[in-house]
Image: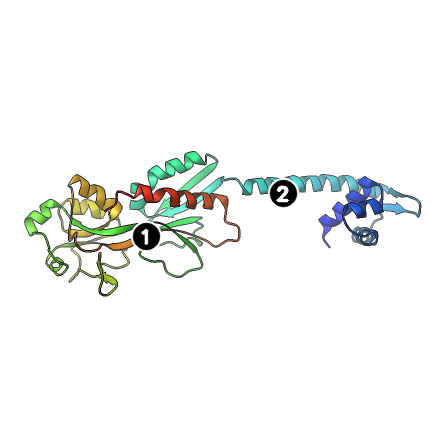
Amino acid sequence: MDTFNYMRAFRRIVELGSLAKAAEALDMSSAGLSKQLRALEAHLGAVLIQRTTRKMSLTDTGAAYYAECCRLLDELDALEKSVRRESRLVSGRLRVNAPVSFALSVLTPLLARFLRQYPELRLDLAMEDRLVDAVGQGFDVSIRLRAQLDDSSLIARRLASLTQVLCAAPSYLDSRGTPESVDALRGHDILSYTLAESPGAVADEDAGQQADPLAGPALVQVNNSLMLRDLLEEGLGIGALPSFLAAPAIASGRLVRVLPQQPAAPRHVYAVYPTSRHLQPKVKAFVDFMADHLPAAMRGDC
């Protein structure tokens, strides 16, 4: 039994003082409404309305039940209105996961603008240089930098693109020489990012895949791109940096691009979030904002 609908029907009967008028207002037959009233009384085990051929009147039980019906239905209507209103507002807590270097280098100024645009929103940003279970750990959105995403039940939206750029410090190249080919990289000290999808950073156009310039184990392996950049600037070797880190270092002269004639390996920035029939406004607002502003923020990439 749909109790709330039966309560609404009973309330309408009382307010209009006529079963026929109530049936017309509810767009149903008098017989159907009378059946609902009998079912409600049977469910409650009490007579709510005394009915004769000439008139109808509330019993004492019916009057008390009517008062409570009005209170409960008004509270329910207010609750539904509040939920519908909140569902259209960008508010509440937004949990986002993003790589450390990308968050610190690119996202920080954008997040400030985003939060000023949506002052009712609270942000919980977790920075991790590893792929996480977005659903299992309760994240609303996960930012991922990948050449391509694995198949999953998650929704992915591409926000921007970047490249992996081979570079080294001028001091290293002065002492060890500048490689002129991918093969020549095998005679150099290599610094690598341990969480990369592949160790290569140079696109192999013939194979349609990334070439691996490493002949053996890297001199240094790190799981954070900011640390990798700093070690490269110290002159420890050659390594691949995401273009949002490589570009400013190259522009300032702290690093030099290696093999600039070679096509760089592409990467993309994705927003990944759980599937839902009704995408939460806070998630939609965040993903739309990043799709609108990330490309411009990364325009200075190599």
- Which of the 4 quarters of the picture holds residue 152? bottom left
How far apart marks 2 and 1 lie (CA) works out to 41 Å
Q: Where's residue 140, x and y in %?
A: 44, 48
Residue projecting furthest to the bottom? 207
> Nearer the N terminus, badge 2 or badge 1?
2
21 left or right of 293 in image:
right
Position above or below: 62 against 198: above
263 left or right of 43 in image:
left
Q: Where's residue 22, x and y in %?
A: 80, 45
Q: Residue at x 83, y 51 (%)?
A: 30
- Which of the 4 quarters of the picture holds residue 49? top right
Report the amino acid beneath label 2.
Glu
Q: Where's residue 126, x and y in %?
A: 37, 45
Q: Residue at x 19, y 44 (%)?
A: 230
Q: How many marks?
A: 2
Q: Secondary structure at mark 2?
A: helix
Q: Could you tell me which quadrant the N terminus lies in?
A: bottom right
Q: Nearer the viewer, mark 2 or mark 1?
A: 1
Q: In the rendered image, is residue 48 in sight?
A: no
Q: Secondary structure at mark 1?
A: strand
Q: Where's residue 238, x and y in %?
A: 15, 52
Q: Which residue is mark 1?
A: 268
In the picture, the disc for residue 40 is none
The crowd level at tag 2 (other Cα within 10 Å; few <14, some 14-19, many 20+) is few
Q: Which residue is mark 2?
A: 80
Q: In the rendered image, is residue 80 in sight?
A: yes
Q: Residue at x 33, y 58 (%)?
A: 148
Position above or below: 254 against 45: above
- Which of the 4 quarters of the picture holds residue 234? top left
254 left or right of 268 in image:
left
Report the amino acid beneath label 1.
His
Between 61 and 149, the residue placed more toward the observer is 149
